[in-house]
Image (spheres, grey):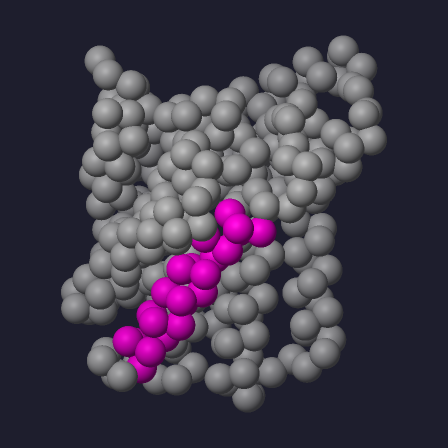
Amino acid sequence: MNVVALAVVPVFGTVALGYALARAGLFDSDSGRGLTRFMYYLAIPAMLFRSLLEAELPQRIPWDYLCAFYLPSFFLFAIGMLCARHFLGWQRHETAMAGMSAGYSNMVLLGFPLTLAAFGPEAAVPMFLLLATQSTFLFPLTTYTLEMTAPERAGGARAQLGTIIKLIINPVILSMMLGVSANLLGFGLPLVVDRSLELLSAAGPACALIALGISLADYKIGGSYRDVSLLIGLKNFVHPLLVWIACDALDIETTWKHVAVVLAAMPCGLNAFIFATQYDIRKETVSKCIVVSTALSSIVATLLLAWFHR
């Protein structure tokens, strides 16, 4: 079995297993939420902290790399909003969900297991840079857009401050900040603590993938096929293509480019559904985008990895 199959089949196969077990009734939504909480608050933070503590960090902030990923992401956020408003007929206050569906990748549950399996330890730093910054950049943008286009929901300065605080204490972002700080300070872990974090870290990828499969089984397959086709076209095809072009234009190192392109090809992130539910906006369309985009990403990721490992 070649390196692409070894990377793709176990990852998407584990998602499919979680989905099948949920559909068979062996796991319910409470099981999925429990796995997600364990993964989100313990396993993934332990993995991120330990990996970044031991990683060889770049000497400077790689602004060219961040620009190569986020300029296309912001562009697609805007294009998704414009298309939803002028071609799909969405109301103005709904368009932020189209932007997030088109430009926000599922990095935590799907992106990090796949990139680590495909590229190994060399993928750690470029992947964590994007993992650390995606929510930091796109959550406030989405929240701001939703609030600005729906004056009756505006929370003012207090709501904006609350958003900033939530981002800072987010366990994923906090663990990465602590990992980088400990690395820069030359901090070492006692052996017992390191082994404990290693045990928690080992559970992270499997829990993330099973939780994703269970979550997908809960989502309703509803909404307009025209809307979904446009948004997943932007997310699954245009996003990785633009990131690839930007990486070439900015002369990004090969492994970092491959990581960025694969993460851009990941499906619409589950957080889009959280926003849609919280604001009661286009929940059926967003849920269908997540399901179809996840299935499609298995094909796109396989083709990309086959090209990169040719």
Q: Is residue 148 above or below residue 247?
A: below
Q: Quadrant of the C terminus?
A: top left
Magenta residues: mostly which secondary structure?
helix
- Percent across and percent down for residue 27 are 38, 34
Residue that lies at the very extreme toward the bottom in this rendered image: 151
Splitting the image into 4 quarters, where does residue 140 fall? bottom right
Comparing 212 with 233, the one in front is 233
- The quarter of the picture where residue 56 lies is top right
In percent of width and height, residue 55 lies at 64, 26
Q: Position of residue 26 (x, y in %)?
A: 34, 31
**Residue 156 visible (yes or no):** yes
What count of labels does the image hold?
A: 0
Percent position of residue 48, x then y: 61, 32
74 is within the stretch colored magenta:
yes
Boundaries of the magenta span? 63-85
Residue found at x 55% / y 55%: 135
Q: Is residue 206 magenta?
A: no
Could you say which is closer to the camera, residue 98 or residue 127?
127
Q: Residue at x 38, y 37 (%)?
A: 258
